């Protein structure tokens, strides 16, 4: 046991001492990029375009090369592809580091109703994982806590900063709920009755909590401060969004009905069974954060390729959706998950939007990011190949709010180190 303890301490110490890329410096002069195939993110593509950005904002996107005449720094990206930065949704990036070292995992709290828990102040900008996902085009992330019924408040971060104060892009923009399981497992004879009874009890307890929180918010000066209820104030004014994790069709319907009852903005997260309730989702205009399409079917009677087909099905049904990955380091594969959808009928531009503009729309920050358009943040990257293709993707430059970021990371460092090892 002592050996394991000391080995863990040694490994963790070495991990912390390895080099970490420094955040980029503030953009000081206008920069132009010419010749790249620009994927706007909203369905448009410019085959050989010009992108100009200054003071961290995009000022021009088009084909007029003469716009670059007065610009000192011009980047020739002929033959390259330019994309908006990808957005990782419902992740715990920055809240976890080494899966087998509990001291590095900070995304789950004890308790059932943790409305006052915020990912904001726990976000670790020094995480070695963050540079690895940036190298695959993920430049922003929604970071959400887990655990309990009400997990806590999520925030959106841009992935290049000295501290969480600099990194935060949209603070406390959502509250995450884990919807109760409608088909609890029990070995008793009356298992189904018991599961249904437990399910109804959990929903009633959740409804009681929401009733108290709403009543608390109606008081201008409560006699006693309740941090949990206080954290829900902006939910009632629709300044915050209620993100409900639910996968089964029954759970999703009940979750939406619950949110409508309290007249709050709602987004379904996970939504593996969304294909069974398309008309319901469309009728109520419910956005979906679709989880992990690289998986097995949720039900035994589903087609084996249903997880891969679901994005196309949602797109054709007119339902706003984006893709997400479980965990934190897995976010590096977000682009490839979108690329996989191409083989199952989703168009290239829709696949790209599913990890960029659609995510920004769901987060209600699309006026600032998510696509390559004038007035938006200069958060994008240049790839030497198709960014959605695992084989050809090679990201060579990236900018976040106009700052050119260092694309080095722990994985590249280890590759350089061991590729030189004598055979």
Image (cartoon, grey):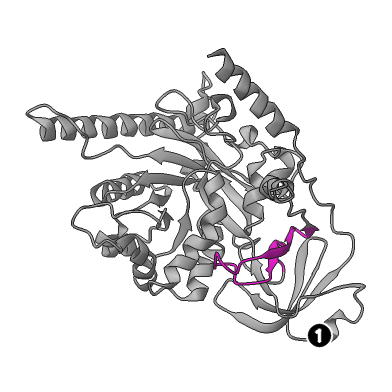
Q: Closest to the observer: 413 or 267?
A: 413
When asked about the image quadrant of residue 17, the answer is: top right
Say which of 69 and 361 sits in front: 69
Residue nearer the viewer, 33 or 77: 77
Residue 393 relative to residue 417: left or right: left
Looking at the image, how many numbered discs can be counted on the residues?
1
Residue shown at 70% from the left, 75% from the top: 80
**Residue at coordinates 23% horizontally, 29% vertically from top-left?**
201
User: Against 179, is 10 above or below?
Assistant: above
Magenta: predominant secondary structure element? Answer: loop
Q: Which residues are magenta?
A: 375-403
Residue 379 lies left or right of residue 30; in this view the side is: left
**Which residue is drawn at the image coordinates 46% and 35% (left, top)?**
146
Indicate the secondary structure of the residue bearing disc 1. helix
**Relative horizontal placement of residue 367, taking residue 255 as reference (left or right):** right
**Image coords of residue 127 (percent x, y):** 67, 39
Residue 394, image x, y percentages? 66, 65
> Which residue is denoted by mark 1 in the rendering?
65
| 152 in magenta | no
Check if residue 399 falls in the magenta segment: yes
Q: Position of residue 203 (x, y in %)?
A: 28, 34
For this orientation, the residue located farthest to the left is: 189
Identify whether 271 is placed above or below 45: above
Q: Is residue 317 left or right of residue 35?
A: left
The residue nearer to you, when weighing 115 against 332, is 332
- Could you tell me which residue is drawn at 77 percent across and 53 percent down? 406
Neighbours of disc 1 within 10 Å: few (<14), some (14-19), many (20+) = some
- Residue 259 point in image, percent of width and height: 36, 46
């Amino acid at each position: 046991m002592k050996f394991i303890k000391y080995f863990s301490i040694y490994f963790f110490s070495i991990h912390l001492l390895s080099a970490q890329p420094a955040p980029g410096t503030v953009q000081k002069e206008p920069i132009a990029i010419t010749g790249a195939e620009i994927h706007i993110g909203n369905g448009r593509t410019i085959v050989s375009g010009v992108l100009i950005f200054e003071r961290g904002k995009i000022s021009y996107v088009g084909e007029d090369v003469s716009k670059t005449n007065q610009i000192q720094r011009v980047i020739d990206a002929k033959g390259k592809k330019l994309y908006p930065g990808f957005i990782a949704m419902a992740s715990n990036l920055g809240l976890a580091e080494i899966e087998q070292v509990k001291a590095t995992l900070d995304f789950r709290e004890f308790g059932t109703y943790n409305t006052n828990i915020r990912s904001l102040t726990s976000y670790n900008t020094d995480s070695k994982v963050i540079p690895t996902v940036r190298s695959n085009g993920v430049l922003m992330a929604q970071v959400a806590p887990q655990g309990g019924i009400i997990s806590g408040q999520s925030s959106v971060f841009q992935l290049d900063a000295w501290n969480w104060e600099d990194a935060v892009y949209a603070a406390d923009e959502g509250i995450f709920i884990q919807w109760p399981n409608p088909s609890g497992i029990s070995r008793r004879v009356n298992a189904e009755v018991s599961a249904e009874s437990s399910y109804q009890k959990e929903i009633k307890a959740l409804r009681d909590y929401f009733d108290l929180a709403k009543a608390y918010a109606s008081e201008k000066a409560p006699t006693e401060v309740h941090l949990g209820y206080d954290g829900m104030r902006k939910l009632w004014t629709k300044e915050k969004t209620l993100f409900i994790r639910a996968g089964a069709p029954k759970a999703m319907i009940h979750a939406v009905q619950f949110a409508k009852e309290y007249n709050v903005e709602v987004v379904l997260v996970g939504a593996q069974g969304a294909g069974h309730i398309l008309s319901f989702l469309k009728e109520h205009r419910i956005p979906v954060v679709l989880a992990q399409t690289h998986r097995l079917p949720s039900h035994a009677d589903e087609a084996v390729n249903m997880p891969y087909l679901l994005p196309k099905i949602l797109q054709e049904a007119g339902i706003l959706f984006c893709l997400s990955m479980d965990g934190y380091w897995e976010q590096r594969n977000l682009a490839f998950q979108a690329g996989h959808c191409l083989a199952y009928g989703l168009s290239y531009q829709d696949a790209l939007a599913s990890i960029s503009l659609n995510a920004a729309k769901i987060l209600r920050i699309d006026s600032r990011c998510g696509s390559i358009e004038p007035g938006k943040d200069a958060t994008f990257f240049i790839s030497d190949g198709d960014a959605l293709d695992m084989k050809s993707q090679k990201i060579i430059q990236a900018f976040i709010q106009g700052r050119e970021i260092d694309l080095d990371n722990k994985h590249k460092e280890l590759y350089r180190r061991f590729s030189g090892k004598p055979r």
